[in-house]
Image: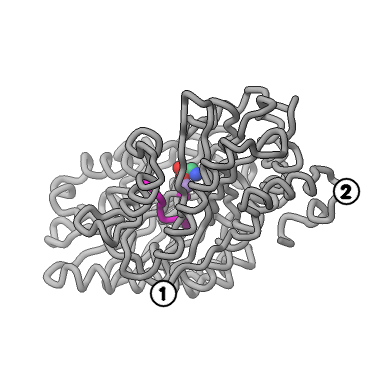
Amino acid sequence: MDVMLLNEAGERVERRKALVDLIQSTHPDKTGAFLLCAGYEREREQFYQDSTFHYFLGLQEAAAMFYQPLQGTNSLFLPNYAIDRTAWLPVTFDEESLASLAIEQVELLGKPIMGYSTGPFYTPASLETLIERLTQLCQDEQFLFAPLQDISTECLLVMRQLFEYVPGLKEQTIDISPLIAQLRRTKSQAELEYLYNAAEITAMAHQAAAGVIKSGVYEADVQAAIEYIYTESGARPAFASIVGSGVNSTILHYVDNNAKLPDKGLVVVDIGASAHHYCSDVTRTYPVSGKFSEAQKKVYQDVLDCQTYIAQLAAPGMFLCNKKHPDKCLNTLAHDFLKQRGYEVEKVFPHGVGHFVGLDVHDVGDYNEPLAVGDIITIEPGIYLKDKELGVRIEDVYWIVKDGAICLTEEVPKKASEVERFMQDACFTDNNDFYKTGPNEH
Ligand code: GLY
Ligand code: MN
């Protein structure tokens, strides 16, 4: 049993209580149960748990469903696999972990299904126990509270099958995505530590990237160094690593990473580790030659000044993006800042200035709500000049506190002169001390 899971089981139970309270205060005249769906395995791919399921349960079991009456006994439902799953995959929980997570009973979803793993496709027979429970709920004129947005396609497919198999369920289901987003948005101390850990691994990956970038190497060489650090640290990419050089630096989500670095060009390295399911997201822009040209330095400084300006303004009460409050909207303020520097921002800065970060790299949270203590956001202005084959983006992760924002990723240098020195000093070799620590030691 994962020690971490045991340590945090109490926090997960509290989160579920908070969800029940929130459902009851938002819908005081309704009662019923909430349902959460786990993620699904894909054949021969590593399983990654659904973020909301992980937040409330922490179990790494695929295809599970958790059913919690607002008053009454909860159940963890599992598919009735026809063959012994433990012969193929590790056991993900035991009685101790279920007890610590206050999971009261484990039930089979229905009749046996083929194999030791399943996709999100069920016959009514294979879901019959859950169908009976939901049919009773509808007959009792109660409600099912379930997230219907911000969920995986697999979870959505399962919900659609339940709507098809249980008459009246669709009409008696209330979407609780906004309530879950509200809870997930505010990070606890334990979550902050995970976010900081992911930030540290990402910082090491930037150090490796800075050690590899030079003329003659390929974008893929840089990506390989980055992902070596992740793998060695027990992490994985939170999103496809972006290593865009030359004209590719101007393509926002370029992930082909197959071009040779142009001698005098820039490389945008937009990467993030996901460790213990928490993500980071840090972008630096490096000169391939190790020295920024004057033209590159000018654009670089404008982007850095914009980031510094927005980071000083980020605080409770400001908004990531809310058009009704332009004077408090970080997105508008960033665009206005770069407009004043003479850029045609609609063309050269076509993305938002930031997003929430957490269990997902673009985490849940309403951008129209003011920022609050405990939020984690990125600040990531950029300028992309296609005709000059010159793209610059600088991105860090910030923790919103009472009177401002604290950068979680400041150890990755970002002043132009510091970036140049970082590239000189960094080297990618497995003789470095930090490559010697094991997956659980960072
Ligand atoms: N760093 C990738 C993104 O924010 O979309
Ligand atoms: Mn980002």
Which quadrant of the view contains residue 67? bottom left
Numbered mark located on residue 431 in the image: 2
Could you tell me residue 263's position as x and y percent? 69, 26
Verify whether residue 358 appears in magenta: yes
Please tell me which residue lies in front, 16 or 144: 16
Name the residue at the right extreme.
Answer: 431
Verify whether residue 388 appears in magenta: no
Q: Alpha-carbon neighbours of circle 2 within 10 Å: few (<14), some, or many (≥20)?
A: few
- Considering only vertical position in the picture, is 313 above or below 298? below
Please tell me which residue lies in front, 59 or 142: 59
- The magenta-colored residue range is 352-361
Determine if residue 133 is in view.
no
Identify the amino acid type marked 2.
Answer: Asn
For the point 65% across and 37% down, which residue is it? Answer: 287
Numbered mark located on residue 268 in the image: none
Q: Is residue 424 left or right of residue 257?
A: right
Q: Secondary structure at mark 2?
A: loop
Q: Secondary structure at mark 1?
A: helix
Q: Are marks 2 and 1 in contact (CB under 8 Å)?
A: no
On-image quarter of the N terminus: bottom right
For the point 39% across and 68% down, which residue is it? Answer: 315
Could you tell me residue 379's position as x and y percent? 46, 54
Please tell me which residue lies in front, 131 or 59: 59
Q: Earlier in the sequence, mark 2 or mark 1?
A: 1
Name the residue beneath numbered marker 1.
Answer: 14
Disc 2 and disc 1: Cα gap in Å?
A: 44 Å
Could you tell me residue 411's position as x and y percent? 65, 59
Q: Is residue 351 left or right of residue 195?
A: left
Could you tell me residue 175's position as x and y percent? 23, 54
- Considering only vertical position in the picture, is 121 above or below 13? above
Identify the amino acid type marked 1.
Answer: Glu
